[in-house]
Image (cartoon, grey):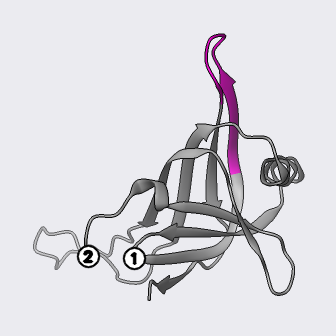
Amino acid sequence: MSAQRGKDMLVRIGDGAVPEVFSTVAGLRTKTISLNAREVDATHAESNGWRELLGAAGVRQCSVSGAGVFLNGAAADDIRATFFAGAIRNFQLVIPGMGTFEGPFLIANLDYAGDHDGEATVSIALASAGVVDFAAAP
């Protein structure tokens, strides 16, 4: 895989319709997607002093964070309303040259900030709330 542009990473929110249409969460300059699996320690007396882990037993999760310039619009209104409702919505996380993660997420954090002599900014954190599927890029 060749190098990819970071600006091509996308965080998109679904509209809940069938078929679902996704809109890009606009203005994000930085995006981080973290995949984690909780370890289950299966070490016992006969492990010879080495830790043993139980495979495929831990809880998996995907977390997403992003920050950038606040842009007002339909997607921004949707994000804000979703946060205040505490709703779980489908999101797509597009990684260029790799593929797309898709699944239900909760908006765990939504921050707005700004300096008196700069632009208004927004940051968002998402926490997976169910199975996250992956589709490889064609």
The image shows residue 136, relative to residue 67, as above or below, that is below
Lateral position of residue 40 relative to residue 91, left or right: left
At 78% from the left and 48% from the top, the residue drawn is 76
Lateral position of residue 68 relative to residue 33, left or right: right
Mark 2 residue crowding within 10 angstroms, few (<14) / some (14–19) / many (20+): few
Part of the protein shown in magenta:
108-120
Task: Point out the tag, 2 or 1, that comes first from the N-terminus.
Answer: 2
The image shows residue 85, relative to residue 10, as above or below, that is above
**Tally of marks:** 2
Q: Amino acid at mark 2?
A: Met
Magenta residues: mostly which secondary structure?
strand
Q: Which residue is mark 2?
A: 1
Is 66 or 22 nearer to us in this picture? 22
Q: Quadrant of the N terminus?
A: bottom left
Q: CA distance from mark 2 to mark 1?
A: 8 Å
Give percent across and percent down for residue 38.
43, 66
Give percent across and percent down for residue 71.
73, 40
Q: Which residue is mark 1?
A: 98
Contact between labelled residues 1 and 2, with CB atoms less than 8 Å apart:
yes
Asked if the stretch drawn in magenta spans residue 81, the answer is: no
Is 102 or 88 nearer to us in this picture? 102
At 84% from the left and 54% from the top, the residue drawn is 78
Classify residue 129 by image quadrant: bottom right
Give percent across and percent down for residue 63.
54, 59
- Residue extending farthest top: 116
Label 2 SS: loop
At 10% from the left and 74% from the top, the residue drawn is 48
Q: Quadrant of the C terminus?
A: bottom left
- Residue extending farthest left: 48
Q: Amino acid at mark 1?
A: Met
Label 1 SS: loop
At 52% from the left and 69% from the top, the residue drawn is 94
